[in-house]
Amino acid sequence: MANYRSTIRHRNSGSRKSVSGDTHEVTRVRTPQKDRNEVLATVLNLLGSKRVTLQCMDGVVRMGRIPGSKKKRMWIREGDIVIANPWEIQDSKADVTWKYTRPQVEWLERKGYLN
């Protein structure tokens, strides 16, 4: 039994990879589509109950709603960059449809999507 454990420990110790050496290369980033009425937005604060305050890139502060299908998948914090779909009926409200990761935000900044 002791030999079995030592071989497992030895086998796992050699397969460790350094996290600092990894570079995250972004190959494909979803951008907002004007034909779907999507805008980039920054999360200002969390209101609770699937609701957030958004500062959209078109200059409007909207109340954003995270749909139930994406609520558990997207963990949104203050300062995150998201894609929002403004409502057609009320322009002061929007649905949050996408959240960007840090490498994707850096790519958006390099390409000029974020001012």
Image (spheres, grey):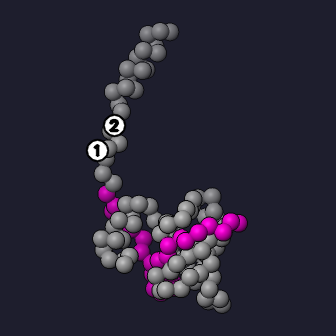
Q: Split into 4 quadrants, where in the image is the C terminus?
A: bottom left
Residue 56 as seen in the image, left or right of residue 19: right
Residue at (32, 77) in percent of width and height: 112
Label 2 crowd bin: few (<14), some (14–19), many (20+), radius 10 Å: few
Label 1 crowd bin: few (<14), some (14–19), many (20+), radius 10 Å: few
Residue at (36, 71) in percent of width and height: 108
36 inside magenta stretch = yes
Vertical relation: 2 (above or below) 31: above
Extreme residue toward the right, this view: 49
**Amino acid type indicated by mark 2:** Lys
Query: Which residues, given as a range, are shown in magenta?
Result: 25-49
Vertical relation: 6 (above or below) 111: above
Q: Secondary structure at mark 1?
A: loop
Query: Which x, y percent locates residue 34?
Result: 45, 85
Vertical relation: 105 (above or below) 94: above
Q: Cβ–Cβ below 8 Å for labels 2 and 1?
A: yes
Residue at (50, 73) in percent of width and height: 42
Q: How many marks?
A: 2
Extreme residue toward the top, this view: 2
Q: Which mark is residue 87?
A: none
Residue that numbered label 1 is attached to: 21
Q: CA distance from mark 2 to mark 1?
A: 8 Å
Residue that numbered label 2 is attached to: 17
